[in-house]
């Protein structure tokens, strides 16, 4: 197990961190930071509402930034409120006066400025061997580190959880331009899946040998699914997270209606816990699973309490997600729950779910989803299947353990520092590149 040396420090620049950001990005960032906190004695976080103070020029202290908190709050208010309307007016004027891209915002500009100033102080302090991490998206999370690097070269690592959207022809988007700035500056990049790492390395000319895989981080759970679980009433099939229109397809809906024609439907209770949704979400669910239970606006502790009692977790892929490792999949694995994936053949989710002992069903194969739903009900009623599943799941659960995530993070951090010192000719030997960080 790698442990950060006492005179080393890690500074994380990550805009989206739970609970200020309730997105999947925010949750995995919070989990990763929490795991790292247990192994690193000098750890700082710059997030949507937090900055850093330096104590005695040696130690980092995470503090709330009142200016950022106020602006962040205003930026999220509806435009029919006084401060919500005021923020939008000031934002529009500021962008026009400064001739900035519509992809920017007043809050973002000030966030980058404030966090850059904090990082400059840290880089000029007596802190030794400090390594900087940025976790994106949003891509502007990396800007304070790039700004500091342009003043003073520093070792930094970029974590990328999702590919960038680009609706432009023959031009890079705002986010892509930010990432490209790291090509000659960052020591390495990390991704939650090998497929995403390869995709991004090829697309943006990243050094593939310095692109490592660290799965999404999830904290170890107190309650793990037990094969001897006694089911009272119906089997609970639960979906949590964002309702992606691209994942909840018409063909998926047809398969659910087909499933409702079989007797197994009477043994199942569908529960949807939605974090991001719209009117279409409710219409789709009610049309295809009329008796489904829908929850919204639940805090994370409540969600985990409900899912801990699940009999099956539904994880659902869009065709656009085939190269991605979804945070909700890893969350279900961290609870040891049986998983039914609605995905596509040979997607990252498909491969992980099979290795874990769950079942994959495919959006592009007629009758497959309805058949697998019926099959899963039969499996869950079998003590033999449940017992075999609980034995098989251990391998994948070990791969996403807190210990594995911490070890990978610290080893890659150490490599980044050593490579930076070698590149700056402060060390004679080129460091050995870490290996085996290529799952999933």
Image: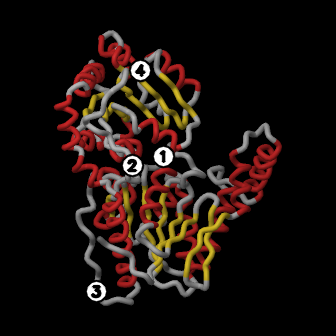
Please rate how many residues cluster around mark 4, counting C-alpha atoms within 10 Å: few if below 14, some from 14 to 19, many from 20. some
Which residue occupies the foreground of this view, 258 or 220?
A: 220
Q: Earlier in the sequence, mark 2 or mark 1?
A: 1
User: What residue is drawn where x is 38% and y is 14%?
Assistant: 257
Q: Earlier in the sequence, mark 3 or mark 2?
A: 2
Task: In the rendered structure, find residue 56 and report the number of the disc placed on it.
Answer: none
The quarter of the picture where residue 5 lies is bottom left
Disc 4/disc 3 C-alpha distance (Å): 57 Å
Residue corresponding to mark 1? 24
Q: Earlier in the sequence, mark 1 or mark 3?
A: 1
Disc 4/disc 2 C-alpha distance (Å): 38 Å
Residue corresponding to mark 2? 222
Q: Earlier in the sequence, mark 4 or mark 2?
A: 2
Of circles 4 and 1, the one toward us is 1
Residue corresponding to mark 3? 429
User: What residue is drawn where x is 64% and y is 59%?
Assistant: 49
From the viewer's perspective, is 399 left or right of 13?
A: left
Of circles 3 and 2, the one toward us is 2
Residue corresponding to mark 4? 250
Please rate how many residues cluster around mark 2, counting C-alpha atoms within 10 Å: few if below 14, some from 14 to 19, many from 20. few
Disc 3/disc 2 C-alpha distance (Å): 44 Å
From the viewer's perspective, is 61 left or right of 36?
A: right
From where the camera sits, is residue 11 visible? yes
At mark 3, the secondary structure is loop
Q: Earlier in the sequence, mark 4 or mark 3?
A: 4
User: What residue is drawn where x is 79% and y is 43%?
Assistant: 85
Q: Are marks 4 and 1 in contact (CB under 8 Å)?
A: no
Return the x and y of residue 387 as percentages of the image width and height: 19, 37
Q: Is residue 282 above or below residue 247?
A: above
Return the x and y of residue 120 as percentages of the image width and height: 60, 78
Which residue occupies the foreground of this view, 51 or 201?
A: 51
């Amino acid at each position: 197990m790698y442990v950060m040396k006492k005179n080393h420090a890690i500074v994380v620049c990550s805009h989206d961190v739970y609970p200020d950001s309730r997105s999947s990005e925010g949750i995995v960032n919070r989990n990763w930071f929490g795991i790292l906190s247990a192994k690193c004695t000098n750890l700082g976080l710059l997030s949507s509402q937090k900055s850093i103070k330096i104590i005695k020029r040696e130690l980092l202290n995470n503090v709330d930034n009142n200016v950022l908190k106020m602006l962040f709050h205003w930026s999220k208010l509806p435009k029919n409120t006084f401060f919500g309307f005021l923020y939008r007016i000031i934002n529009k004027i500021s962008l026009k006066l400064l001739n900035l891209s519509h992809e920017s915002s007043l809050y973002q500009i000030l966030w980058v400025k404030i966090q850059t100033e904090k990082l400059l102080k840290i880089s000029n302090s007596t802190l030794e061997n400090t390594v900087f991490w940025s976790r994106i998206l949003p891509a502007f999370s990396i800007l304070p580190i790039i700004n500091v690097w342009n003043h003073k070269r520093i070792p930094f690592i970029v974590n990328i959880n999702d590919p960038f959207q680009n609706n432009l022809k023959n031009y890079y988007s705002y986010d892509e331009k930010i990432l490209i700035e790291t090509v000659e500056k960052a020591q390495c990049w990390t991704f939650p899946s090998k497929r995403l790492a390869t995709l991004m390395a090829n697309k943006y000319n990243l050094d593939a040998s310095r692109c490592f895989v660290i799965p999404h981080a999830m904290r170890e759970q107190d309650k793990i699914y037990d094969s001897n679980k006694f089911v009272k009433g119906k089997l609970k099939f639960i979906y949590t997270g964002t309702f992606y229109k691209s994942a909840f397809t018409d063909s998926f809906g047809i398969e659910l209606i087909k499933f409702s024609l079989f007797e197994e439907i009477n043994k199942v209770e569908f529960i949807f816990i939605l974090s991001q949704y719209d009117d279409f979400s409710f219409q789709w669910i009610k049309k295809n699973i009329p008796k489904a239970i829908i929850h919204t606006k639940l805090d994370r502790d409540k969600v985990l309490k409900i899912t801990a009692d699940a009999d099956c977790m539904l994880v659902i892929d869009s065709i656009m997600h085939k190269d991605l490792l979804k945070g909700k999949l890893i969350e279900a694995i961290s609870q040891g729950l049986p998983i039914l994936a609605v995905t596509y053949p040979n997607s990252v989710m498909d491969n992980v779910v099979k290795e874990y002992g769950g079942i994959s069903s495919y959006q592009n194969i007629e009758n497959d989803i309805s058949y697998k739903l019926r099959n899963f009900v039969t499996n869950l009623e079998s003590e033999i299947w449940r017992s075999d599943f609980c034995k098989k799941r251990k391998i994948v659960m070990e791969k996403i353990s807190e210990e594995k995530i911490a070890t990978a993070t610290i080893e890659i951090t150490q490599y980044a520092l050593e490579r930076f010192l070698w590149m700056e000719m402060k060390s004679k030997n080129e460091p050995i590149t870490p290996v085996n960080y290529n799952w999933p």
